[in-house]
Amino acid sequence: MENQIKINDNGPLQVSGDFQIFDAEGKEYPKKAKVYLCRCGLSNKKPFCDGSHKKGGFESSPRTSE
């Protein structure tokens, strides 16, 4: 599977493929084929999304300039 990061409108980053995520101390999070990373800052499971953006009113829908 190709590595991919998708920016979901008003929601998290969807990361899929063969990748690793490490915390600030270099400890690796359990490996998964797909994760959702928080963009709103409201999640209680950071760096992962817990859906808090829905209740928090987070809005962000970036688009490429092309």
Image (cartoon, grey):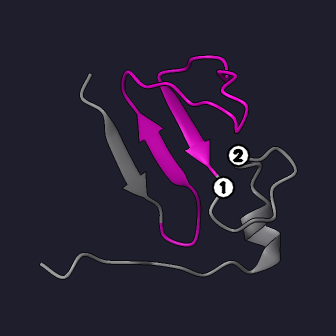
Q: Quadrant of residue 63?
A: bottom left
In the image, what residue type sits under mark 1?
Answer: Cys
| Residue at 37% over, 47% down | 5
Whether residue 16 appears in magenta in the rendering, the answer is yes
Q: Which residue is the extreme one toward the front?
A: 25
**As drawn, 57 above or below 44:** below
Residue under pointer 2: 47
Residue 10 located left or right of residue 41: left
| Residue at 47% over, 61% down | 8
| Residue at 47% over, 22% down | 33
Q: Position of residue 18 (x, y in %)?
A: 38, 21
Residue span colored magenta: 9-37
In the image, what residue type sits under mark 2?
Answer: Pro
Q: Quadrant of the C terminus?
A: bottom left
| Residue at 56% over, 35% down | 35
Label 2 element class = loop
Whether residue 11 appears in magenta in the rendering, the answer is yes
Q: Position of residue 1 (x, y in %)?
A: 26, 22
Q: Which residue is the extreme one toward the top?
A: 31
The first of marks 1 and 2 along the sequence is 1
Q: Are marks 1 and 2 in contact (CB under 8 Å)?
A: yes
Q: Position of residue 65 (x, y in %)?
A: 19, 82
Label 1 element class = loop
**As drawn, 17 above or below 40:** above
Q: Main secondary structure of the magenta part?
A: loop
Badge 1: few (under 14), some or many (20 or more) residues near its Cα, within 10 Å?
many
Q: Position of residue 61 (x, y in %)?
A: 45, 78
How far apart, in angstroms, are the residues tagged by discs 1 and 2? 6 Å
Residue 63 located left or right of residue 9: left
Residue under pointer 1: 38
